Image (cartoon, rainbow, N blue to C red):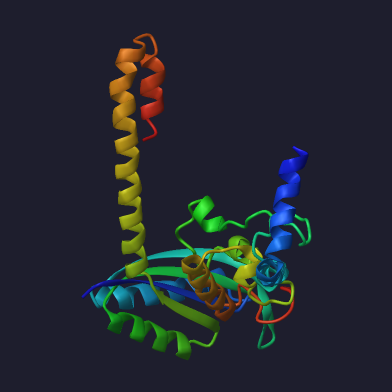
Amino acid sequence: MNRNYELMFIVRPDMVDEDLNKLISTLESSVTSAGGTTKTEVWGKRRLAYRVGRFNDGIFVLMLIDGVGAVVHELERRLRVTEPVIKFLTVRTDEELKRLDKIKKIRDSKKKASAAPAATAAPVAATPEAGTETSASAPV
Amino acid sequence: MAEETKAPTAHAGSSGSESRPERSGSDRSERSGPRGPRPAGGPGGPREGGRKYFRRKKVCKFCVEKIEAVNYKDVRLLAQFVAESGKITPRRLTGVCMPHQRRLSRAIKQARNIALLPFAGRAQ
């Protein structure tokens, strides 16, 4: 069963881009080989809220993973072994995404319900305002 | 008019034994009235006997602005609900509703774990 995860990890600030890219590509390949998909965002260097070891800042990387739980397990094991990684956090997001989808759907249906009577009322009220009406309905 | 105003007093005087305990009872309720809401900090309207002040009702920021996704990555948002000491601000001060406070506190704790927010003290 595929689930969505967000894996954020911090590497030490003095890591070279080349090494970081290599690390990311190995992590990605380990996910894809297990039948999952990933999307990686590198946030770049950021100040840490507190000292970790002897580091005051770090390079933040966010991976969006779609796969089974074993994939995450493997990734975490790799991150633990990898020396330049100073912190990581995995969050499961599929239920949250589902919830947000549901809310969005409800809101959209409400919008349509409110837009429908307006559309029926508009032709009766004034025909020259047709131009404004279409512009208003476009963002919906 | 004068007769009408006199009449109730005369009536009260005649049945004084009955009306007095009632009055004292109502006095008690008046005293306990202002005392009751004070610790709760509820919306204390201008009430007779109590302090006259008006407190605006707090509303949940997340409900008003329709922010559904309370995420640990949104540091700007979370930082609004963290005291300077790094503590999560209680709901009674911010007015956040319970469902959102639950999500909020979870997000803050996750953000702390990944060093986006401090556990204690100000972010450096």
Q: Nearer the viewer, residue B48 or A133?
A: B48
Taking depth in this image into account, of A140 and A64 the one nearest to the observer is A140
Q: Pick the quarter of the image with the N terminus of chain B.
A: top right
Q: Residue furthest left?
A: A1
- For the point 53% across and 51% down, the residue is B64
Q: Residue at the far front: name it.
A: B14
Question: Which residue is found at the position 78% from the left and 56% from the top?
Answer: B52
Q: Is residue A46 left or right of residue A21?
A: right
> Residue at coordinates 69% horizontally, 56% vertically from top-left?
B11
Query: Does A125 appear above or below B37?
Result: above
Residue B50 x, y percent position in the rendering: 76, 62
Q: Is residue B54 visible?
A: no
Residue B12: x and y, percent? 70, 59
For this rendering, which residue is in front, B33 or A18? B33
Relative side of A121 to B121, left or right: left
Query: Quadrant location of residue B74?
Result: bottom right
The quadrant in which the C terminus of chain B is found is: bottom right
Image coordinates of residue A71 in percent, x first then y, are 31, 80
Q: Tell me where residue A29 sits by quadrant.
A: bottom left
Residue B120 visible? The answer is yes
Q: Quadrant of residue A4?
A: bottom left
Along the line of sight, the residue nearer the viewer: A29 or B40: B40
